[in-house]
Structure formats: structure tokens, C-alpha cells
């Protein structure tokens, strides 16, 4: 199945796009013609206490890396122009699971800006984070 819109957006099965999520995408791309990809952090709706604090802290401390490399994204919370996704060859289907978001962000950065907006938050389940740990999920 092919996407037919100008902008394609990606979420994970356990995400809960908030009200206004599509409007945010539209606004970002309408006001920045050089934008190749928009992403933002997760907010874990089923985690509490120290785990939520640590995971939120990771997104804050990762920002210097984003500034250094010029790209950072979350695979379950991003949008990009369909023509850029096509021009960069789509998804690399040799990547089994971890790393596809880094790969997409790196390749998209050759076509324009990859913006990681702290305000573009996606509520999602922390079940994988609880099971596999922050280092594995964030480091790969």
C-alpha cells in the first residue's frame, strides 16, 4: 500500500496521538520549506516514578547530541514529506528492529532539516522500556 498524501506520518501500535498532533505536523511543514523530518519525544503513559523521570531525562540530555549531529528522531513519532522518503530510498528493510529511526534521520538530513521538537510529544506505552531497559532502547 502506498501513501498518497504529501506528508507521511508514523506512529507505533501502542502510541496514542494527542489532539492536535496532525495540526502540529501541518504547521511545521507549512512554515518551514526546508524541513525534511519532524520528530519529538515519547511520554510514557503507563510508567511512574523514577522510570518516567529517567526516560524524560534521557530526551533532555540527548539534545546536545542532536545539536552536534543535526539529526535525532523517534521512530514511533515522526513525519516527513513523501517525496523525500521516496528520494532517500524509503526504509532500509535490512535493519531488523533497533536503529531504523537513526538511519532514517541520518539519510533525511541530507535533504533538509531534521527537527526534534520537545513540544511534539507522543504518549506511548513503556512496556518495551520496562522489559529491555533504557540503555538498550536509547543506545541502539
Image (cartoon, grey):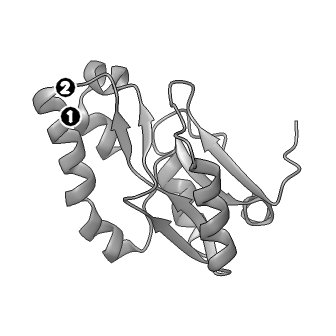
Q: Between 12 and 20, which is closer to the camera in this rendering? A: 20
Determine which quarter of the picture holds residue 46: top left
Quadrant location of the C terminus in the rendered image: top left
Q: Residue at x 42, y 61 (%)?
A: 72
Quadrant location of the N terminus in the rendered image: top right
Q: Is residue 125 visible?
A: yes
Q: Residue at x 69, y 73 (%)?
A: 30
* Residue where numbered disc 2 is placed: 48
In terms of secondary structure, where does tag 2 sit?
Answer: loop
**Taking 97 as reference, is 137 left or right?**
left
* Residue where numbered disc 1 is placed: 52
**Taking 82 as reference, is 129 left or right?**
left
Q: Residue furthest left?
A: 50
**Taking 8 as reference, is 34 left or right?**
left
In terms of secondary structure, where does tag 1 sit?
Answer: helix
Q: x%, y% of residue 29?
A: 66, 70
Q: Between 133 and 34, which is closer to the camera in this rendering? A: 34
Determine which quarter of the picture holds residue 79: bottom right
Q: Residues within 10 Å of mark 1 (few under 14, many from 20)?
A: some
Amino acid at each position: 500500500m502506498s501513501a498518497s498524501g504529501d506528508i507521511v506520518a508514523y506512529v507505533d501500535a501502542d502510541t496514542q496521538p494527542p489532539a492536535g498532533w496532525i495540526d502540529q505536523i501541518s504547521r511545521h511543514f507549512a512554515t518551514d520549506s526546508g524541513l525534511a523530518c519532524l520528530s519529538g519525544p515519547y511520554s510514557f503513559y503507563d510508567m511512574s516514578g523514577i522510570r518516567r523521570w529517567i526516560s524524560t531525562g534521557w530526551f533532555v540530555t540527548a539534545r546536545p547530541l542532536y545539536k552536534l549531529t543535526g539529526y535525532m528522531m523517534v521512530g514511533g513519532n515522526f513525519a516527513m514529506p513523501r517525496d523525500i522518503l521516496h528520494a532517500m530510498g524509503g526504509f532500509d528493510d535490512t535493519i531488523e528492529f533497533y536503529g531504523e529511526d537513526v538511519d532514517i534521520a541520518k539519510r533525511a538530513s541530507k535533504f533538509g532539516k531534521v527537527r526534534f521538537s520537545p513540544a511534539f510529544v507522543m504518549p506511548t506505552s513503556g512496556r518495551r522500556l520496562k522489559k529491555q531497559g533504557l540503555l538498550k532502547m536509547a543506545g541502539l
